[in-house]
Image (cartoon, rainbow, N blue to C red):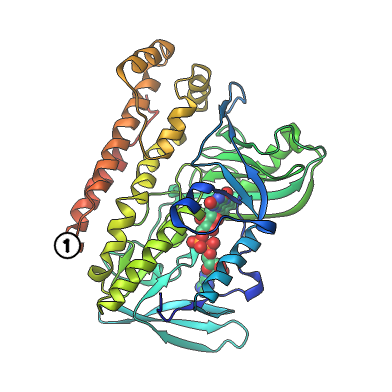
Amino acid sequence: MGLKTLILEKKKREDIGKKVCGDEISKSHFDATGIDYPSGDEVSSVVSGADVYPPNLQNELIVRGWSDFDGWTVNRWRFGQRLLEEALRAGATLVDQARAGNPEVRADRVVGVRYRDVQSGQEDVIRAKLVVDASGFAAVMRNNIDSPLVEKRVAKEDVALCYREIVKLRVPMAEPEVARVFLGGRFAPRGYAWIFPKGPQTVNTGVGIGGGSGARPPRALYELFKEEYPLLYDCQVIEGGGGAVPVRRPLKSLVGNGVAFVGDAALQVNPIHGGGLGPGMRAGIILGEVAKEAIARRDTTARGLWDYNIRYLTGYGRRLASLEVFRRLLQQVSDDDINFGFEKRLLEAGDLMAANRGEGIPMGLLEKVRRLKRGIGRLSLLRDLQRAARLMKKMDRLYRRYPHEPDRLEAWNQSVLQVIEAAVFGRR
Ligand SMILES: Cc1cc2nc3c(=O)[nH]c(=O)nc-3n(C[C@H](O)[C@H](O)[C@H](O)COP(=O)(O)OP(=O)(O)OC[C@H]3O[C@@H](n4cnc5c(N)ncnc54)[C@H](O)[C@@H]3O)c2cc1C
């Protein structure tokens, strides 16, 4: 868009895009942003459908036609390299092996960023009208900015800790395009284990668990999963690694004075499955448009950039916020309750899809009565489900009314926190 854009990246250029990830990305994010679909060697496998298993591995939900999930697994490195090349072709300049550090602050405004050349150790400062922290989970700048608009701390329970491997199976899969998700249980307390296809005989498989749960480390849980799940017996490990991803609603403000946040640094990740590629891509497009306008108006204060908050948080971010309530429900009800819910079909595949689209858990009166009959014996679980549905709606309404100016942010955020505090389930 004609803006002078500099990318500081700590890795070598040829390593950009290498990241421990589940590699799954839905087609819907490309349709929403206009970014070209992955193609050629960027694609590992098509993903079409998911089987979701409760802790006892019985009565799984067979989800097909889930347009918000179906898409591809990508070769993460090649996909990252393609996005980088597109940015460079559009006029951005890359300085690789440059580790960004503290923001350069004047009065209450970010005016640049300090960085260190990884090879020589030499330090320098870059000044800019707008600095964007896109440093992922590390959020290197955000954690060093003192402003009432900028949240630094993310609670341990709002982080998923993961370990994953890419493995070659002994035999080809029966349904090579279907993703498998395993909720809770011994392998993934307060989280899930996954097997995503990477080819007819190759998968990306791992475990992500809620932080602060006191459970065994994700790698140990993953090894247990691998030992006990027959598909993975005697598989050949191609690569492995650990990582962390935020699973909370996005930051209350995605901007400060002279600064904006995007991707994991802005907590733009789906709280129920930890998918952050699409939510970050959607935000990046909006931020680019808002930045261009703000720079043209010579106003990159928080107020000048506020439209990014409004456009993202009343749109896709709203969906992520109501999903935080759903995540809390899934994490707090017992494994036994989840098994019961799957057995009696208290949650259907359609509910999962609607919840993921940010539509809450829509239930007509007749449907409520049907489920009440099926759920007799576990009324408390039904009550939790209904309460979660109500709180998700409330969160949705709050985000639709995101404040139009920074002065009203704090009052709004207090209302959001009240919903979060009420999202306590499974205690009886
Ligand atoms: C195990 C695991 C599985 C996941 N599975 C999926 C999945 O299947 N689908 C999905 O959509 N999402 C998944 N995610 C989440 C997804 O990987 C992230 O949401 C996404 O990569 C975030 O993109 P980002 O650009 O914000 O951050 P990143 O991809 O982390 O990129 C940040 C970049 O900033 C650079 N950087 C960091 N610090 C500095 C610094 N100080 N100076 C300069 N450069 C710096 C890094 O080198 C990197 O290139 C998963 C995450 C994990 C951990």
Q: Which residue is mark 1?
A: 407
Q: Position of residue 259 (x, y in %)?
A: 34, 72
Q: Considering only vertical position in the picture, is 127 above or below 287?
A: below
Figure quadrant of residue 319: top left
Relative depth, front residue between 404 and 3: 3
Figure quadrant of residue 179: top right
Figure quadrant of residue 89: bottom right
In the image, what residue type sits under mark 1? Asp
* Residue at left offset 21%, top offset 56%: 410
Q: Position of residue 49 (x, y in %)?
A: 59, 35
* Residue at left offset 51%, top offset 77%: 8
Q: Taking 25 as reference, is 408 left or right?
A: left
User: Label 1 CB, ligand 1: below 8 Å?
Assistant: no
Of the four image quadrants, the one with ligand 1 is bottom right
Q: Position of residue 373 (x, y in %)?
A: 40, 10
Inspect this view and state whether residue 244 appears: no
Label tally: 1
Could you say whether the residue bearing mark 1 is in a helix, strand or loop? Answer: helix
Q: Considering only vertical position in the picture, is 111 above or below 21?
A: below
Q: Taking 369 as reference, is 44 left or right?
A: right
Q: Quarter holding the N terminus?
A: bottom left
Q: Position of residue 238 (x, y in %)?
A: 76, 53
Relative depth, front residue between 314 and 106: 314
Q: Quarter holding the C terminus?
A: top left
Inspect this view and state whether residue 58 appears: yes
Q: Residues within 10 Å of mark 1 (few under 14, many from 20)?
A: few
Relative depth, front residue between 313 and 323: 313
